[in-house]
Image (cartoon, rainbow, N blue to C red):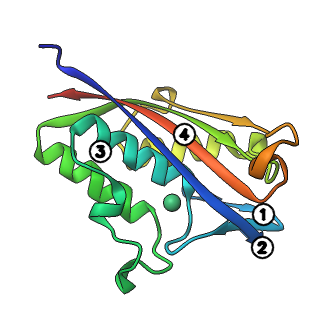
């Protein structure tokens, strides 16, 4: 049996008026931001779900219910640290992460390196093992109308 396992995570958040938009743990100046029970960080939520998927550990909503007061406004770095710790305890280690963000705004390009470094830090990875791509919705659907942001992540996990 291969020691490698792959997981997929997808997270969508509605966008509303804001001063910043937190993505990948970095606060990006923006006139729109995600509306969510926690800080609404779709990138970190998708990454957590991808890691949990690879580990066969259900999903983020099971670990951190969105109707629990303790998770209100919570910094999603906490979720990543918990997921990382659970994988380690199960003898698993994240090897690489690749993320696609679909949104009209904010633009990620100027912040991509900082986000990659932050995520690499959270999962104890070299920065070139974390990738981030930004796409628009080409004017189509809820993404294209600027009403929502969606992040999709894949994680490669290996047993240690
Ligand atoms: Mg979410």
Which residue lies under the disc numbered 3?
Answer: 52
Which residue lies under the disc numbered 1?
Answer: 29
Which residue lies under the disc numbered 2?
Answer: 19
Front disc: 1 or 4: 4
Q: How many marks?
A: 4
**Which percent across, then down, holds residue 33?**
71, 66
Cα distance between the residues tagged 3 and 1 = 30 Å
Asked whether the residues under the numbered discs 4 and 3 touch, taking CB atoms below 8 Å apart as contact, a structural biologist would say no
Q: Is residue 21 shown to the viewer in this render? A: no
Which residue lies under the disc numbered 4?
Answer: 152
Asked whether the residues under the numbered discs 1 and 2 touch, taking CB atoms below 8 Å apart as contact, a structural biologist would say yes
Judged from this view, the residue extending furthest toward the front is 141
Helix, strand or loop under label 3: helix
Residue 68: image tag? none
Cα distance between the residues tagged 4 and 2 = 24 Å
Q: Quadrant of residue 135?
A: top right
Cα distance between the residues tagged 1 and 4 = 22 Å
Quarter of the image with the C terminus in it: top left
Helix, strand or loop under label 4: strand
Neighbourhood count class around disc 2 (C-alpha, 10 Å): few under 14, some 14–19, many 20 upward:
few
Judged from this view, the residue extending furthest toward the bottom is 69
Q: Is residue 137 shown to the viewer in this render? A: yes
**Which percent across, then down, holds residue 111?**
71, 46
């Amino acid at each position: 049996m291969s020691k490698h396992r792959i997981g997929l995570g997808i997270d969508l958040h509605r966008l509303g008026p804001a001063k910043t938009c937190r993505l990948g743990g970095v606060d990006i100046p923006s006139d729109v931001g995600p509306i969510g029970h926690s800080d609404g960080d779709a990138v970190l939520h998708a990454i957590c779900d991808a890691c949990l998927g690879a580990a066969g550990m259900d999903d983020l909503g099971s670990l951190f219910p969105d109707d629990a007061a303790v998770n209100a406004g919570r910094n999603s770095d906490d979720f990543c640290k918990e997921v990382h710790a659970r994988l380690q305890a199960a003898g698993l280690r994240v090897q690489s992460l690749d993320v696609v963000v679909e949104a009209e705004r904010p633009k990620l390009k100027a912040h991509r390196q900082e986000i990659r470094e932050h995520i690499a830090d959270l999962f104890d990875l070299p920065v070139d093992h974390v990738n981030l791509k930004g796409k628009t919705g080409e004017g189509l659907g809820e993404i294209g109308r600027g009403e929502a942001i969606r992040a999709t992540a894949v994680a490669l996990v290996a047993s240690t």
